[in-house]
């Protein structure tokens, strides 16, 4: 099983920069890797999975860094249908994953993490991020 230290410092720093800008988000070691949470809800979780340990990782051909996050249900299929670097996790109804690496579009990751935050945070905090008109 991987440990928090298995995620490269470069990836951790990029995610810390993104997550650190979201109201009341905190970082903590997870059972595998590192996660960022709002209250007791996970916004993003980054780790190095063991491909043979769980079938959702079977398509990975070697060591990879993966981030799971929440996606609005109406966007989940569109995000994951094209395949690499995205795939759907088989837990939770709206959980997606992205393989991170040299190919990563960090602007897109920032948008996805922000959307995940909006799925998990209380509405009054979401308003601080996206404004009043976007919160139902």
Image: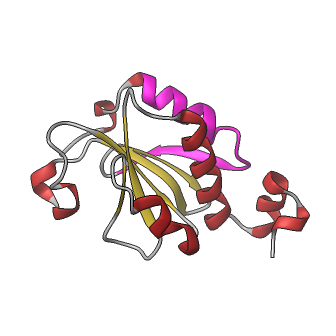
The answer to which quarter of the image holds residue 119 is bottom right
Q: Does 93 sit left or right of 119 as displayed?
A: left
Q: Does 128 sit left or right of 120 as displayed?
A: right
Using the image as rendered, state which of residue 43 and residue 39 is in the foreground: 43
Q: Residue furthest right?
A: 132
Residue 20 is a magenta residue: yes
Using the image as rendered, state which of residue 78 and residue 70 is in the foreground: 78
Q: Does 18 sit left or right of 49 as displayed?
A: right
Does residue 83 lie above or below 136 as drawn?
Answer: above
The answer to which quarter of the image holds residue 5 is top left
* Image: magenta residue range: 10-30
Q: Residue furthest front?
A: 82
Residue drawn where x is 77% and y is 60% of the image: 126
* Place of residue 69 in the rendered image (x, y in percent of width and height, measured from the top left): 48, 57
Residue drawn where x is 44% and y is 22% of the image: 10
Does residue 101 lie above or below 113 as drawn?
Answer: above
Q: Where, quadrant-wise, is the C terminus in this rendering?
A: bottom right
Residue drawn where x is 78% and y is 59% of the image: 125
Q: Residue furthest top?
A: 10
């Amino acid at each position: 099983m991987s440990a928090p230290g298995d995620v490269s410092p470069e990836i951790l720093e990029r995610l810390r920069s993104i997550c650190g800008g979201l109201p009341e988000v905190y970082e903590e070691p997870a059972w595998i890797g590192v996660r960022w949470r709002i209250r007791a809800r996970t916004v993003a979780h980054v780790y190095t999975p063991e491909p043979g340990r769980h079938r959702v990782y079977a398509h990975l051909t070697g060591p990879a860094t993966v981030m799971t996050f929440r996606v609005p249900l109406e966007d989940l299929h569109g995000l994951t249908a094209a395949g690499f670097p995205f795939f759907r996790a088989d837990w939770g109804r709206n959980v997606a994953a992205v393989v991170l690496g040299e190919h990563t579009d960090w602007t897109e990751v920032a948008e996805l993490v922000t959307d995940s935050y909006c799925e998990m945070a209380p509405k009054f905090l979401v308003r601080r991020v996206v404004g009043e008109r976007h919160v139902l």
